[in-house]
Amino acid sequence: MKTIIDFTSLTDSKEWHTITDVVMGGVSKSNFEVLTDHIGVFSGHVSLDNNGGFAMVKHKTTLHCKNYTTICITLKGDGKAYQFRIKENTETKHWFIAPFTTNGEWQTIDIKLNSMYAMYRGNEVNIPNFNGDSIHEIAFLIGNKKAEDFKLELKNITLK
């Protein structure tokens, strides 16, 4: 097992960047912060106004995953559905995604890398599932086609 992120440094929050539907005229709001107890918190409000409806937080990285098959995320959500996203190349427009639903308790989500499929702007892309040797960007997205507040707490992300 290899730890990717464990939020042990408060400066980790500067390495995460939020993006919302504001980029296309929406009015959703989001925030990311690392708390003193080593928890990363992605929170905010998704609005459907002005054809909006999503919030995302992303982090650039360089992860060599050739010898790993699974990403494990320890998190606590609010019972809502989210997507975990990866890019093998920051220049590509598509993401490889894995939807997951939180249960309101601390849980570990295991995602097989080769089960992650390509999406671009909400549409599936007709290319093979992820089979890369490295990951250069990771993200979490909420976009459930409804106006809602959200809060996703992240404890750590590992490869196994």
Image (cartoon, grey):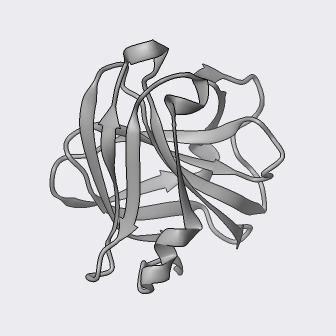
Where is residue 155 shown, x and y percent of the image?
Answer: 34, 71
**Name of the residue lying farthest toward the left:** 105
The structure residue drawn at horizontal position 54% and vertical position 51%, both measured from the top left corner, is 139
Where is residue 151 shown, x and y percent of the image?
Answer: 26, 49
Residue 2 vs residue 102: left or right? right
The structure residue drawn at horizontal position 39% and vertical position 39%, both measured from the top left corner, is 29
**Name of the residue lying farthest toward the bottom:** 9
The structure residue drawn at horizontal position 71% and vertical position 24%, both measured from the top left corner, is 125
Q: Is residue 49 visible?
A: yes
The structure residue drawn at horizontal position 57% and vertical position 40%, both measured from the top left corner, is 97
Residue 81 vs residue 58: left or right? left
Residue 92 vs residue 112: left or right? right
Q: Quadrant of residue 48?
A: top left
In the foreground, 69 or 141: 141
Q: Quadrant of residue 106?
A: bottom left
Q: Is residue 159 visible?
A: no
In the foreground, 5 or 49: 49
In the rendered image of this protein, does residue 87 appear above or below residue 143?
A: below
In the rendered image of this protein, does residue 8 appear above or below residue 85?
A: below
In the rendered image of this protein, does residue 114 appear above or below residue 35?
A: above
Where is residue 157 shown, x and y percent of the image?
Answer: 46, 69
In the foreground, 61 or 22: 22
In the rendered image of this protein, does residue 119 appear above or below residue 151?
A: above
Where is residue 40 shown, x and y percent of the image?
Answer: 36, 67
